[in-house]
Amino acid sequence: MNLQTREHKLIEEIKQWTGDTGIGDDCAILPNGHLVTCDTLVEGTHFVTGQIDFADLGWKSVAVNLSDIAAMAGRPRQLVVSLTMPKMLPHLDFQKLYQAMIDCARAYRCQIIGGDLTAGPQLVITITCLGDVHEQGCLKRTSAKPGHVVVVTGDFGASAAGLWLLQAGESNCGKYSYLLERHCRPRPRLADAWSLVSKTGSAKAALMDASDGLADALVQISRGSGVGMEIDLDRLPIHSQTKEVAKPAQVDPLDWALYGGEDYELVGTVDPAIWNEFSKAPETENLFWAIGTVTEKSGVSAKGAGKAKMELDLLQSFQHF
């Protein structure tokens, strides 16, 4: 059982060096009630030019930042964009990239207000997003409590399946447009997060996004809150297209769902009394799906889907370091 990656260890060291125990959430919370987050996409690590259209890349680079704001139920306001670009990048590609960033920002009612341009050997996109704490409070990954219901939005594994299609040269396959869309143009779950925090406030729910995979999010909430979880694998939402593509890829779709990453769905826990009301209300029904329960015993265990009880292994996730 491996529940801590090298990245997690480095973050813990940074927290010790800075003396700031608040480091580690999806956003930093500033004293004036604002949120700030920063994400970087690096050519060769997060994307390969030629496999993804520059318009899709521009949209995605903004959307992943907005997902961090959604993970704390915040409201995004401004974006600062810094680009490192090869000197020979065609102007048309630059225009497509930047226009798509503007389009994504406008779609979610925020604005690009500045940034930086530099030259370098490969394309690197770094975006900082500023936002406001929701008027009902801020959801953090450290608020899970025993007895809470573990909940998620959307479905998992679709982005990993979409990436496999791109790498296999199937980017023009309209049959799997859902998977390609999920990988290339993720949709930050802002409205879903606002619905949740409006019902729970800041004290009766925990939340984060699943950018590094569902398993990683479950472990981080568990560790940050000092609780455990029991997950029902039979209840994990996995799209039919993900299951279909997993066959030629010779991958267990459950592995994509748990460890594939880049789904940018929300993962959280909710007080059971609130969940019972929230999940049945017409305006919020089917926004989130229950997949397990929070326990007092530490660690995250899972069973179902024809598998015996197992512990999650984060070394199966993508490793930056």
Image (cartoon, rainbow, N blue to C red):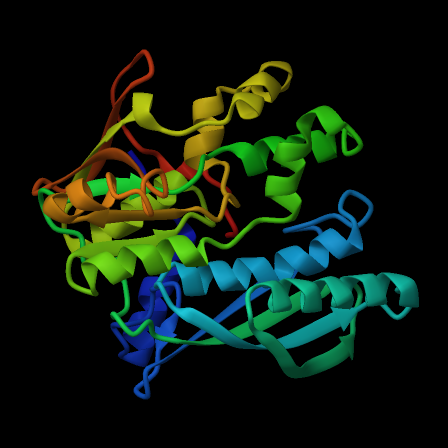
> Which residue corresponds to the image point at 16% horizontal and 40% vertical from the top-left?
276
Residue 137's x, y, as percent? 25, 70
Residue 132: name its quadrant: bottom left
Residue at 27 percent across and 60 percent down: it is 197
Residue 22 relative to residue 236: left or right: left
The residue at the far front in this view is: 282
**Nearer to me, 103 or 148:** 103
Q: Quadrant of the N terminus?
A: top left
257 vs 202, nearest the viewer = 202
Q: Residue at x 32, y 40 (%)?
A: 285
Across the whole image, how many numbered discs are drawn on residues? 0
Residue closest to the far bottom: 32
Left or right: 250 in relation to 43: left
Please state the horizontal and vertical placement of residue 80, each as a whole percent of the image: 60, 78
Residue 165, image x, y percentages? 69, 30
- Left or right of residue 250: residue 27: left
Location of residue 217 in the rendering, given as x and y in whole percent from the top left corner: 35, 47
Q: Residue at x 31, y 21 (%)?
A: 234
